[in-house]
Image (cartoon, rainbow, N blue to C red):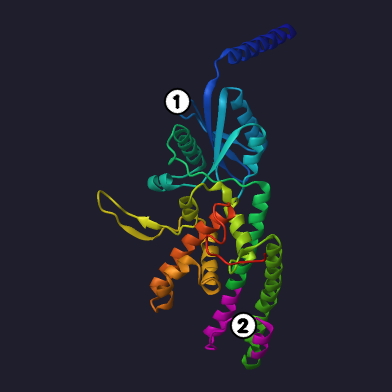
């Protein structure tokens, strides 16, 4: 019995050695595309070897398992390219794959195909990502909408900026809940009702039970006020040097955090499109039809630029786009005023890009500078 067991083990060893030699002698593929569907505790990965069909989806139950899987692919191909969708897991996986010499891309989530077929699961997502990645690498740039991955320093700056914005949103939401209570009891609407002076006057005319309910929100709202002021001061400290009057240090810091790096954009069209302040278009043949702005850029950039415009209108009336739209701004048509603000904001984004990248000076752009 012992002899049979030994012979069986020897046969297994010989078979394994033969398989290893066979894999080593097999020619490497030129490229393997891997689409990864990420989840909290699991990963689904599908691969496509050169021009062959997409293979079965591998279910991986840890990050280490995924890394080991991709390293095995590197042994079988000259180039391995992976892609996954941007989401709540950030860019940690991207950086780990890059550190191991694996080319990785991050794309915008797209479920249009799954919605059309009314079927969606992790395996379908992984296979779709693999197919789109292969098409993208073969020249179809529309197959994937890539995300510009920030450095760790850029990501930290953006997180600080977005935390400030989230605090402001939470304050606005909670203040609206208190105001809704007052309106529901026929007591009218009050702005900034939780501030000390306003609330001290308000509570003198309110029933005790309403004051008790409002007091719960007052404590939280005043704490939010403190946190927002601290966040604003921290953002302002990140800016040094001159700036256009009316732009605001906080706004410029937040704008830079969302853009990551002004020098990444090579022409005025790209920086204007990033704010989403360009007209939509529905044209065919010789006919051209332009509509409202696309709003396909980063919403935070569009909001910051719009806030800047209103201050620029007040503090820099000599700014050329402001002078161009001055008759509209002085008129009474609110719809036209909005269009004017959008047009000025689009040009302001381009001019800030020119100033930040050294393509034009503040004097050439007719901008008054402060903090010099």
x and y percentages locating residue 2 in the rendered image: 74, 9
Residue labelled with disc 1: 51
Q: Dot 2 surroundings within 10 Å: few (below 14), some, or many (20 or more)?
A: many
x and y percentages locating residue 85 in the rendered image: 54, 44
Residue labelled with disc 2: 193
Read off the magenta span.
174-201
Magenta segment: does it hold 107?
Answer: no
**Main SS class of the magenta portion in the image:** helix
Query: Residue shown at 60%/56% (left/top)?
Result: 256
Query: Residue shown at 42%/47% (left/top)?
Result: 112
Q: Quadrant of residue 10?
A: top right
Q: Is residue 232 above or below residue 11?
A: below
Q: Which numbered disc flags the more N-terminal residue, 2 or 1?
A: 1
Mark 2–mark 1 distance (CA, rounded to whole Å): 65 Å
Query: Residue shown at 38%/47% (left/top)?
Result: 116
Q: Quadrant of residue 135?
A: top left
Magenta segment: does it hold 183?
Answer: yes
The mark found on residue 190 in the picture is none
x and y percentages locating residue 93 in the rendered image: 63, 41
Query: Residue shown at 59%/79% (left/top)?
Result: 178
**Closer to us: 310 or 372:** 372
Q: How many marks?
A: 2
Instruction: Report the residue that reaches farthest toward the front.
Output: 363
Instruction: Report the residue that reaches farthest toward the left.
Output: 286
Q: Secondary structure at mark 1?
A: loop
Q: Is residue 285 left or right of residue 199?
A: left
Q: Secondary structure at mark 2?
A: loop
Q: Is residue 106 above or below residue 195?
A: above
x and y percentages locating residue 293 in the rendered image: 41, 60
Image quadrant for the N terminus?
top right
Image quadrant for the C terminus?
bottom right
**Closer to us: 140 or 22:** 140
């Amino acid at each position: 019995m012992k002899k049979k067991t030994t012979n069986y083990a020897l046969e297994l060893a010989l078979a394994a050695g033969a398989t290893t030699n066979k894999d080593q002698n097999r020619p490497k593929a030129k490229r393997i595309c891997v689409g990864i569907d990420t989840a909290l505790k699991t990963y689904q990965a599908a691969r496509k070897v050169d021009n062959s069909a997409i293979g079965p989806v591998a279910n991986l139950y840890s990050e280490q398992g995924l890394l080991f899987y991709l390293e095995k692919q590197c042994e079988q191909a000259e180039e391995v390219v992976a892609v996954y969708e941007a989401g709540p897991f950030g860019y940690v996986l991207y950086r780990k794959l890059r550190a191991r010499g694996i080319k990785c891309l991050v794309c915008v989530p797209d479920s249009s195909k799954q919605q059309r077929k009314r079927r969606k699961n992790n395996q379908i997502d992984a296979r779709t990502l693999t197919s789109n990645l292969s098409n993208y690498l073969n020249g179809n740039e529309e197959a994937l909408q890539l995300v510009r991955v920030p450095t760790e320093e850029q990501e930290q700056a953006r997180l600080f900026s977005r935390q400030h914005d989230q605090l402001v949103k939470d304050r606005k939401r909670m203040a609206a809940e208190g105001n809704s209570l007052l309106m529901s009891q026929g007591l009218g609407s009050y702005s900034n009702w939780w501030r000390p002076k306003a609330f001290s006057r308000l509570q003198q005319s309110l029933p005790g039970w309403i004051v008790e309910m409002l007091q719960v929100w007052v404590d939280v709202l005043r704490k939010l006020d403190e946190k927002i002021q601290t966040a604003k001061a921290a953002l302002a400290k990140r800016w040094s040097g001159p700036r256009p009057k009316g732009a605001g240090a906080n706004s410029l810091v937040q704008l830079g955090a969302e853009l990551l790096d002004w020098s990444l954009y090579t022409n005025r069209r790209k920086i204007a499109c990033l704010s989403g302040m360009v007209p939509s278009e529905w044209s065919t043949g010789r006919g051209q039809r332009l509509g409202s702005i696309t709003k396909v850029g980063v919403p935070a950039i569009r909001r910051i630029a719009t806030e800047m415009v209103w201050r620029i209108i007040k503090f820099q009336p000599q700014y050329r786009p402001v002078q161009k739209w001055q008759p509209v701004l002085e008129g009474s048509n609110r719809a036209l005023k909005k269009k004017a603000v959008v047009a000025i904001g689009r040009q302001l984004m381009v001019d800030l890009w020119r100033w930040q990248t050294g393509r034009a000076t503040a004097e050439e752009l007719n901008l008054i500078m402060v903090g010099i």
